[in-house]
Amino acid sequence: MSLEAALQRALSIRLNLQITLSGLPAVEEWMDIHLDRWLEHVPTPPEMPPGHAVSYLAMLGSDLRRMCWSAWGDPAGFVPKMADYFKLCNIAKSDAAILDQMGEKLEPRLVGSWVGVWGGKVTTGWHFMDPQDWGKVEPLFGTHEAKFLLKKYVTDHKVERVERFTQAIGEGAYSEIELAAPGATVDEQVGALDAAFTHFGGTGLHPGVLQILREAPYPSFGLSARIRAGKVVRVSALVPGMPLPVIEAVCRELKLEGWDDRIERLINTLAVEGVSRVEIGRAGDRGGVDIQVEPTQAAPRPAAGQPVQAPETVN
């Protein structure tokens, strides 16, 4: 891709992200400056090393009460922008020390930052997006209940690596790790997810949700665990892209309040490819479904008098 085309793509993604804000009830006017600040500190194509691009991911809660933007790429392009961004966020010395320590120990090839809105607050942080050996990640955790739970799960299921490591900064900071679901078939991976929900949260996945997941066309599931103050506070099943009616069916099975019909329009604004992944999470007795989209370009608008075409879904 030429530099001119890369710049045009980056501008289109940024513009489409900003356009979606007006359709998100979670985002209040005072939050715009924080979201804009994050966007301004994502490297542009000229700031990235030759041959390297920026990857984006946008998350929308099924009820549009949660959203998150994230980006990542080669450290040479991201680290200077992240340093400036976190200074503007008044990053605490302890948070900066965690980033420096993990960066030194893990030497990630893909790093980035993210910003999200939920619970009436703006939360931000960083992540390493390339797989890391569990043996390198484990010593960086302290001694606490969550580490023992993780270690037992990883050992019992012979998980060898962490797919993603995420860290929030500021008040109520947390860590989140992503693991690939063990197993070679859909049934094996879905069974592993069910066991993980029991292991980390006390109860398995809802039977109706399990049945829906078992109808996936191929095995490509993941698991994420969020750790705060030494405890696993949220566990999530990561599911390959699903058609919106199926996602809505999952929400019904979980008896979640609210399915916002604006979701399809917002997804079409962000990407012609549609949904890339779905996160089915549980924190205590509360559940949630989050839809992830890889922003590229908006889906084409139908010609006058033509029906709107649903976006293709990545399965």
Image (spheres, rainbow, N blue to C red):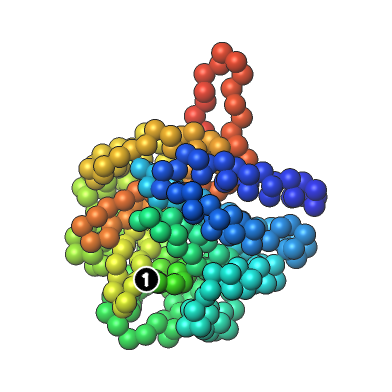
Left or right side of 26 for 272: right
Q: Position of residue 299 (x, y in %)?
A: 59, 33
Question: The disc labelled 1 sits on which kind of residue?
Answer: Gly
| Observer-nearest of 190 and 276 | 276
Residue that sits furthest to the top in the current view: 305
Number of numbered tags placed on the structure image: 1
Please name the residue shown 42% across and 65% down the image: 178
Q: Is residue 71 visible?
A: no
Q: Position of residue 39 (x, y in %)?
A: 61, 56
Left or right side of 210 for 222: right
Q: Please name the residue that numbered disc 1 is placed on.
A: 172
Please name the residue shown 45% across and 49% down the image: 28
Q: Is residue 53 visible?
A: yes
Please name the residue shown 36% across and 67% down the image: 226
| Observer-nearest of 110 and 285 | 285
Quarter of the view holding residue 252: top left
Left or right side of 6 for 287: left
Q: Above or below — where is 155 with respect to 213? A: below
Q: Position of residue 106 (x, y in %)?
A: 55, 80
SS state under label 1: loop
Please name the residue shown 61% across and 29% down the image: 300
Residue that sits furthest to the front in the current view: 30
Quarter of the view holding residue 120: bottom left
Q: Residues within 10 Å of mark 1 (few under 14, many from 20)?
A: few
Q: Position of residue 130 (x, y in %)?
A: 55, 67
| Observer-nearest of 212 and 268 | 268
